Image (cartoon, grey):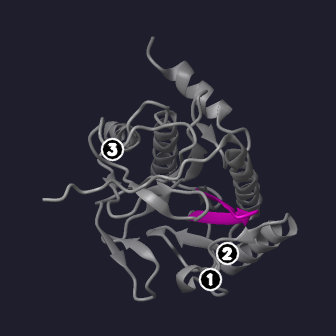
Amino acid sequence: MFKRRRPAIQVKTPEQVEAMRAAGLLVGETLEVLREAVRPGITTMELDEIAERHIRSNGGVPSFKGYHGFTGTICASINEEIVHGIPARERAVQEGDIISIDCGAIVEGWHGDAAVTVPVGEITDELRTLLEVTETSLWRGLAAGKAGARLSDISHTIEAHIRSQGPYGIVEGYGGHGIGTEMHMDPLVPNHGPAGHGPELVPGMCFAIEPMVNLGTKETIELDDGWTVVTADGRRSAHFEHSFAVTPAGPRVLTALDEGREWFAKLEADAPS
C-alpha cells in the first residue's frame, strides 16, 4: 500500500519574495484604482480596460487574460455572482450593488493575486456587514499564517470568525492556493476545516487566501459560460483576497499597500488581553 504524498509547496528565497512583492504591489495599486472607479453606471468592461492599462503601463502583464481561455484582465462578479464573472460591455453596476473585483498580474515571472468587494453607492446595512465579516475573516486568516503553524490553521481561523458572526454560507469547492511562478499552485487552502492539519508553514511559502461568504446557503451553481459561479439561492456574496508570504517576522501581505501593518495592528488591539 502506497502512502499518499502531499503536494510540494514552492519555497521562495528572500530575494524571490521581494520579486513577488513587486507583482503584489502592482495588483494592490490596480485594485485601489478600480475601487475609485466604481460608480453607478460603469460597465465591467470599462473596469477591465482600466485594469489592463494600469497593469501594462506599470511593467506588468495581466495574469487572468487568456488563462484557460478567460477573456478578461479582471473577474468582475456582481451581487449573487461569487467569483469568475466575465467582464462585458453590456454589464453595468447600479446603485446598491456590490461587485467583487479579482485581479492578477505578473512581473518578471512572479504572480500577484488579490480581490476586493466594493459597494456601489449606498448599500444596505446587511450588505455592509457581509463585507465587513468577509474582509475581517481574510485578515484573521492571514494573521494565522505564521511560521510553525499548520496550513489548516488559516482555514480554521477564517471559518471560526465567520461562524461567530451569524448564519452565513461559507463557499466550498473554491478557495485559496499556493502562488509564485504560477498563479495557481499547490496546495488548495479551503476557507473551512479543523485546525492543526496539513504541512507546517515555513518562511518562503506564499499563498493567496480568499474567503467567499454568502448571505444565504453555501450552495453554488456554475453558469453555462463555464466560468461564473453564483449562489444557488440568488442571495448576495462577498469575496476578498490577498497574497502573502510566510516570513520569520510573521506574515507579509504582498498585495496590501502597507503589507498588512494597519490591519494586523487593529487585530492585535482588538484581541482579548
In percent of width and height, residue 157 lies at 38, 37
Which residue, as the protein is rendered here, is positioned at the far right?
57
Q: At 45% from the left edge and 38% from the top edge, which residue is drawn?
A: 201
Amino acid type at image mark 2: Thr
Indicate which disc residue 66 carries. Answer: 1
What distance separates the C-alpha of mark 1 from that of mark 3? 32 Å
In percent of width and height, residue 62 lies at 70, 72
User: Under tag 2, what secondary structure?
Assistant: loop
User: Under tag 1, what secondary structure?
Assistant: loop
What distance separates the C-alpha of mark 2 from that of mark 1? 9 Å
Q: Kindly check if marks 1 and 3 are in contact, taking CB atoms under 8 A apart as contact.
A: no
Q: Which of marks 1 and 3 is nearer the N terminus?
A: 1
Indicate which disc residue 198 carries. Answer: 3
For the magenta stretch, what is the residue range? 99-115
Quadrant location of the N terminus in the rendered image? bottom left
Amino acid type at image mark 1: Gly
The residue labelled by disc 2 is 73
Q: Earlier in the sequence, mark 2 or mark 1?
A: 1
Q: In this view, does 246 lie to the left or right of 20?
A: left
In percent of width and height, residue 232 lies at 31, 72
Q: Which of 64 and 13 is in front in this view?
A: 13
- How packed mark 2 is, by other alpha carbons closer than 10 Å (few <14, some 14-19, many 20 or more), is many
Q: At 31% from the left edge and 41% from the top edge, which residue is drawn?
A: 163
Amino acid type at image mark 3: Gly
Closer to us: mark 2 or mark 1? 1
Closer to us: mark 3 or mark 2? 3
Residue 132 visible within the image = yes
In percent of width and height, residue 42 lies at 71, 74
Magenta: predominant secondary structure element?
Answer: strand
Which quadrant holds residue 110?
Answer: bottom right
- How packed mark 1 is, by other alpha carbons closer than 10 Å (few <14, some 14-19, many 20 or more), is few
